[in-house]
Image (tube, grey):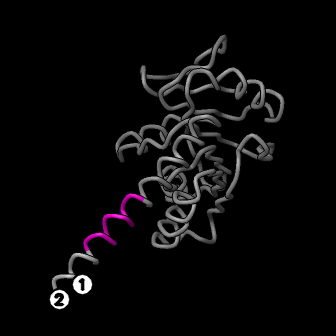
Amino acid sequence: MIIHILFLILYLIFTGFVFLGIFWFFTLAAMVSGAPYVPTSKSHVREMVALAGVRPGELVIDLGSGDGRLLIESVRLGARGIGWEINPLLYFWSKFKIKQAGFQDKIKINYGSFWKADISRADVIVLFLITHKMKKMKNKLQTELKPGTRVVSNGFKFPDWEIINGNGAVYLYKI
């Protein structure tokens, strides 16, 4: 009996280390590609969506959609959503959260790099990147988006791009 309990404890410890290893591997991969996953508070999500001026019928694209919370909030306002997530754990978690919210017919999550995403139909882009990726993203946005598209960046400014509105933590830009 004691051997079974010890085996179970060792198994749980090993499984925990494997899960943490997988989590940190994908977190580091995301940092190289764009940014690590940092959950955004509910109040900050509402602030970002309000700053973007999301309206019914608009298409909101979240580049690095994490657990899907920005898309879920946007769809609550009548928008449609597309997300791109490179971390498979977050990809599956967001699919679960979106289904749980009842929005699986209004939000599509894509597994893969947002650098290859077709963003040309977006009315609103939301993103959270780190400083050294902002210039590359600015080039992608200016090349691929239609005039009038709103871009909301969480935490980081685009270099040499006029901020339309912001509060020091969230910034709105317009193509």
**Residue 66 — which label?**
none
Q: What stretch is highlighted in magenta?
A: 9-17
Q: In this view, does 48 lie to the left or right of 114?
A: left
Element class at badge 2: loop
Residue at horizontal 20 percent and vertical 80 percent from the top:
5
Residue 13, magenta (yes or no): yes
Residue at horizontal 65 percent and vertical 34 percent from the top:
150
- Pointer 2: what residue? 1
Residue 140, percent across and down? 77, 31
- Pointer 1: what residue? 4
The amino acid beneath tag 1 is His
For the residue pair 116 and 99, the one nearer the viewer reads as 116
Residue 39, percent across and down? 41, 45
Residue at horizontal 58 percent and vertical 42 percent from the top:
30
Q: Is the magenta stretch mostly helix, strand or loop?
A: helix
Residue 4, percent across and down? 24, 84
Quadrant for the C terminus, please.
top right
Residue at horizontal 17 percent and vertical 89 percent from the top:
1
The amino acid beneath tag 2 is Met
For the residue pair 101 and 148, the one nearer the viewer reads as 101
